[in-house]
Amino acid sequence: MNVQRFGLLIALASLAGSTACQRDTGGITNTLAPLAYVRVVHAMPDLGKMTGRLVDSVENLNVVDVDYRYVGPYQGVGAGNRHLRIFPSSENITIASTILIDSTITFTAGSYYTLLATGNTQGGAKAKFIVLNDTPPTPSSSQFALRTVVAAPGVGPVDVFASATGGTAPLPATASMGNVSATSAYVTFPTAASLVLRATAAGSTTPVMVESTVLAGAAGTSVQDPIAGSTQGGSVLTAFLFPRSVAGSGAANFTTPGIAYGIDRRPPRPTS
């Protein structure tokens, strides 16, 4: 075949391919399913690492080998009736396949949820999910909001006092969140460089059971979103209150009650 004929064949093939592409108006279209937003909290004080899975479809919940007092971020999952399980994390397949919590939960598209994997795996308060339907407020640019959740049995009810300093400083005359046995209402505070939470048994001011400095957060930049916290207006946080871990169990060793924070709403992005 001479060069001219070969070139002609290439040109014809190219034209045919172009025509076929122009006629092909079909194809595969992926439609994103409606999403709900779910975060998982490890609140089983007698359990070591845990893994959470959606078992009704192939969808990643991304809760793998997390320790006691883990507070996850919100993750988008398909809305509707969803089947979830919690397992102990282990390289031993017999242990890793043990179902600790097995529940079907209905999630509404566009809504936000906290799943407390709470209770005990050995006797006592049986392990289960507690589902919180999260509806955080929208604070102004000079305020942030905070609530307290008693995440696991073994602590509470509590009074939670908020002040600029902790330690030996006197407690405020009135608790910011009083007699909390499950979930408090959100309370709005002015933005502050420092805010300390101190929790006591409800109706008492001594002893202080837990002292914790609230996340401060950080301002956003042109290349980084702001981080929620007490210094950033528009932030909303949850203070999850946990009991000490069960002595002698496989749980991460916490010898006193403590607080871990979850971000319920992030501050607005900078406009410039």
Image (tube, rainbow, N blue to C red):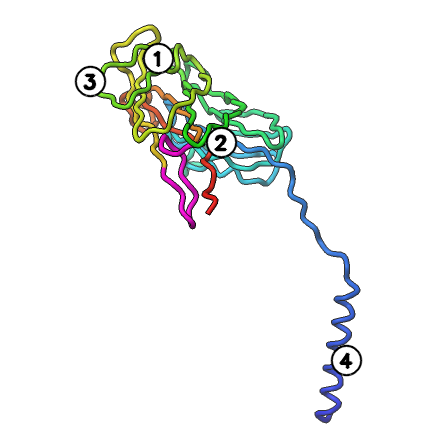
Q: For the N terminus, give its image quadrant.
A: bottom right
- The residue singled out by tag 3 in the image is 168
Give percent across and percent down for residue 73: 46, 35
User: Real-space Cα distance between discs 3 and 2?
Assistant: 35 Å
Lower sequence index among marks 4 and 1: 4
Give percent across and percent down for residue 163: 30, 20
Is label 3 or label 4 in front?
A: 3
Cβ–Cβ below 8 Å for labels 1 and 2?
no
Residue 239 placement, left or right of 136: left
Lower sequence index among marks 1 and 2: 2
Secondary element type, mark 3: loop
Residue 38 placement, left or right of 248: right
Cβ–Cβ below 8 Å for labels 3 and 1?
no
Is label 1 or label 2 in front?
A: 1
Lower sequence index among marks 2 and 4: 4
**Most prominent secondary structure in the magenta stretch?**
loop
Q: Is residue 159 shown above or below 19?
A: above
- The residue singled out by tag 4 in the image is 12
Lower sequence index among marks 3 and 2: 2
The verdict on residue 221 being magenta is: yes
Q: Amino acid at mark 3?
A: Thr
